[in-house]
Amino acid sequence: ELESANGLKNVGALRVNQEIKIPAKSATKTPPDAKGAAANLKDSGDFYTVARGDTPLTIAKKFRVSAEELLKLNKIEDPKKIQIGQKLKLPVKHKSDVAITP
């Protein structure tokens, strides 16, 4: 945003005493489409307690859900900060993820 507001190609090329425009803060941290996607996430009502060695990816694979959805549903910005014993909400699986048996 800084580069765009000042017509810069590289923020690293700023000079001492150069005047720059500071763009206004965005009203939200997430892009509009991501905000809508987060609102559409559904909680399955199930929980998982984080165990030693778990990562968001391994948990997501275990329950056949998206790691991104798991993080968004639990409002986790830094996936490295999950802790042993932490209870995570599990998102609802998408219909295409559910196996159909005859």
Image (cartoon, rainbow, N blue to C red):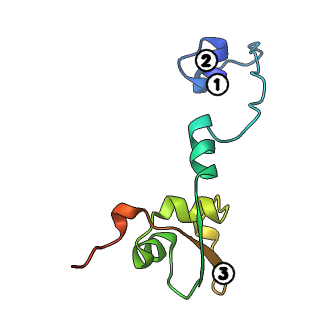
Quickly name the residue at label 2. 4
Residue at screen point 48% across, 76% down: 59
- As drawn, is 70 to the left or to the right of 29? left
Q: Is residue 61 left or right of 18 when viewed as pictured?
A: left
Give the amino acid type for the residue marked by disc 2 in the picture: Ser
How far apart in space, not on screen, are marks 3 and 2 (Cα)? 41 Å
Number of numbered discs visible in the structure rendering:
3
**Residue behind mark 1:** 1
Which quadrant is the C terminus positioned in?
bottom left
Instruction: Give the structural element (helix, strand or loop) at label 1.
Output: loop
Q: Quadrant of the N terminus?
A: top right
* 15 vs 82, nearest the viewer: 82
Q: CA distance from mark 3 to mark 1?
A: 37 Å
Residue name at image x 66 percent, y 87 percent: 85
Pair 3/2: label in front: 3
Mark 2 Cα within 10 Å, few/some/many (few <14, many 20+)? few
Mark 3 vs mark 1: in front: 3
Cβ–Cβ under 8 Å for marks 3 and 1: no
Q: Tell which of 76 and 48 is nearer to you.
A: 48
Residue that badge 3 annotates: 87
Pinpoint residue 7: horizontal percent, then vertical percent. Answer: 60, 11
